[in-house]
Amino acid sequence: MQQFIATRIVQGLITLIIVSFLAFFLVRLKGDPVDITAPPTFNEDQKQRLRELWGFDKPLAEQYVIFITRAVTGDFGIAYLSKRPAMELVIERLGATWLLAGVASLIGLSVALPLGIISSLKRNSLFDLGSTMLASIGTAMPSFWLGLMMIIFFSVRLRLLPAFGARDPSAIIMPSLTMGVGMAAYLSRLTRSAMLEVLNEDYVRTAYSKGLITRTVVFRHAMKNALIPIMTVFGLQLGWLLGGSVVVESVFSWPGLGRLMIDSIGVRDNTVVQAALLFFSLSFISINIVIDILYAVIDPRIRFD
Amino acid sequence: MPGFNRKGILVLALIAVLALLAVPLGAQDMEETEFIFAHPGPIRTLDAPVTWFISTHWLANLLYDCLIWRTVDGSGYVGQAAESWENVDDTTWRFNLRPGNTFHNGEPLDAAAVKWNIDRVRTREDFMVQPQWVDVAEVIVVDETTVDIVTVGPTPYFEFIVSFNGCELLPPGYVEEVGDEAFSRAPIGSGPYVLSEFTESDRYVFEAWDDYWGGRPEIDRVIYQVIPEQSAQVAALLAGQVDMVSNVPAVELPGLEAAGDIVLTKETAAVMQHIYLRVDTTAGNMAETYPDFEPATLDLNVRQAISHAIDRDLLAEVHGAAVPRLGRICPHFPEGGADSFNNPETVTAHYDPDLARSLLADAGYADGGPTVYFDTPTVSRGGNEKEVAEVVSAMLEEVGFDVELNVLDPAAFGEQINSPGNNRDMMMVTLGCSVPLVPLFYRCVWPAAHHDVCVEEWDEVSNAILSEMNSETRLELWGQWWDYWFGVLQNVTLYEVQANIAYSSEFDFTPRKDGWYTFRENLKLAGDDM
């Protein structure tokens, strides 16, 4: 088991190095940040001095070495426009993003699992048809539209919930629901199909024939095997949520990482984009390592393989 | 209950009830006034001189005083840190500071502090506003409350420069003690409000400062809340959770009108919508596009045909909040000489499709063509760019042009026009329209920096305007300047953009003519004298 974890961590580190390389060079493919950051009052000499101040006059390879050497200590440089350390700006937004991702995931899971399990047990029933329909609606509804509709209903009409921000504790309800609905819809379909597949297995029939009640068969025998694909997809979705949802954060003015990243991309603030990208990758990789470890806990064959 | 008879208990109960009633009444008397503005974002640093973003300076002017500042109606200037000022000679401007004035931390705002600030902004090459201050040669401390700013040459629009981006005065002792980085986390100024809390580019809370030289502001708390989506801004206003939204899309106006407790007003956004035409293959970023590409717009006849083919009145209707114009100066500026060709009759008469066809024939396109490439963002500062560009394309095709319209996401459009090697004939841009700034953009020291053109005679006139201290002579020079504007026709002006502003009827608000959402004397509680 220890070797398995160590292998996954080494693989994660290699991925992170590759991502750092891509993050550095891809943001530079977008062009010279000075061209877009400098106001029209700057002439070419002034732009050149800015390039020197920001270190863009050095060869790319040298810039990368400087970047990676500092990045390992958490220093991504000073944001060009706000003059604050890029990492500080990223950390400032992390709490809001993680909180939103956590609550949205809880909503997603707490809706998807019961819905998917009951649908699989009552296949082709009215409940199954209803949950299929709900899942289709949930998947088809764009989060932008759903968010705005919620604001109009709960904030404008009922005046119950704050339309923006993250100051009031109730402010998380609408953005997390907006994100959670999509996740719930997708995961409930996946849970249903994974459960259906497992429920047709011989060992489940054996369990039933031994006289075990449905609850025991489902939770003790079937669920364990059905969890593998559900966890895989959940891990991926949670990874994306931790990177911040630009759309939901924009609609609800949620002060998360997604909005910071988009703002920074717009003005080519490479320091912030790189810091946010690497942090996003780190979250994504960490979650997937945890999920992999959980696979091994649930299914011992994975450890031995 | 020992010690109390029934009467005593009744008296005590009555006192308790009165006390309970008195608490909310007293609390009502003490209720603080709060005003929340929905800012479209992003907001950069509040170490204001560092940044060039106008919408960040909207906030900065609550926190900081400048020496002087522009009046709300755009007609002149008012003193902030300076009580009075005068032009001693062609190159010397004397500012008399308010005696005993301090920054929020008690540090004196004296002549030495002013010198430190202007020297900082004009020498720091990493500051985006630095080029605006290169005309300052020296700052001289005359005495504690008198400071002379000496310019390199005569600078008639110096009051504009000294009241524009980077004018904000910072406390030198505090900045030097904590450094730039720490200052940007906890900025201190001398303006009417103190920054009490903020999350970068999200929410900024300003509290009224009791010791402001002009008295404590009437609104106790001003909050700038970043809400990027326009629909979400409007919803927040309707929900009573923000008090003002600027740039309301026309489609949202009926809903706001029906709300009842919302005031709608319209004011210039101090920008004009233009079509940039490529007139040069050797200057500017545009020249580096498609090296072998031969733009049709190099021919003046083609550029004039474009200008005459456009029905600006119709475009203003399509936009929904615009006033048709022909020249890049907003009429509220006291000089600039643009009134004659920005009046409605002249603009309407300029639309002449037959003349456009004839000009195209003269350019050798009698049988149709030419093909022109037209880049536009879906939406930008001007609003509705995509819709307007589609109508412009239809108008151009009507007179014979073959238009290749390229609609881009705003970020992609920014990349396109600002990166060398991307542009061809035409692009949709929103440009400022202030008298002191416009001539700057048509000087030969500029073309290499942007999309502009170098015409030496025009350059001389622009430079003459920017150094002529006599206002009558300057007006004559403006007359010549406009001849080049229409003669070169690098920019085709379409209209002056207006902003639809919606705000809570609890407030009285006078919009600023410079299009800035800075709230000082122009915002009061409804019913109070403005």
Image (spheres, coloured by chain):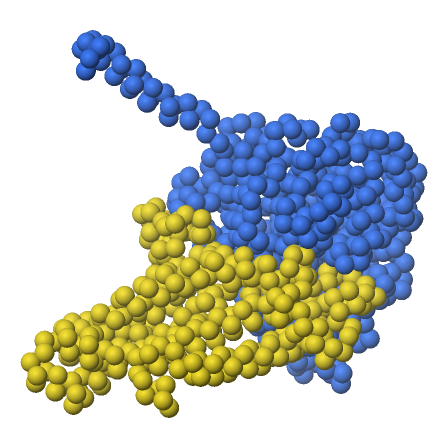
Chain colours: A yellow, B blue
Q: Nearer the viewer, residue B35 or A301?
A: A301
- Can see residue B177? yes
Q: Nearer the viewer, residue B480 or B12?
A: B12
Left or right for B87, reference A143: right
Numbered circles on residues, count: 0
Quarter of the image where one finds residue B316: bottom right
In the picture, the quarter occupied by the C terminus of chain B is top right
Q: Residue at x 75, y 56 (%)?
A: B127
- Can see residue B419? no
The residue most toward the front is: A2
Q: Position of residue B274 (x, y in %)?
A: 67, 62
Left or right for B318, reference B105: left
Quarter of the image where one finds residue A275: bottom right
Q: Residue at x 61, y 37 (%)?
A: B193
Quarter of the image where one finds residue A64: bottom right
Q: Is residue A125 above or below residue A95?
A: below
Left or right for A218, reference B453: left
Q: Position of residue B134 (x, y in %)?
A: 85, 53
In the picture, the quarter occupied by the N terminus of chain B is top left
Q: Nearer the viewer, residue A7 or A85?
A: A7
Q: Is residue A40 above or below residue B117?
A: below
Q: Residue at x 51, y 39 (%)?
A: B35
Q: Position of residue B324 (x, y in %)?
A: 63, 55
Q: Residue at x 29, y 18 (%)?
A: B16
Q: Position of residue B489 (x, y in %)?
A: 76, 65
Q: Is residue A70 above or below residue B507?
A: below
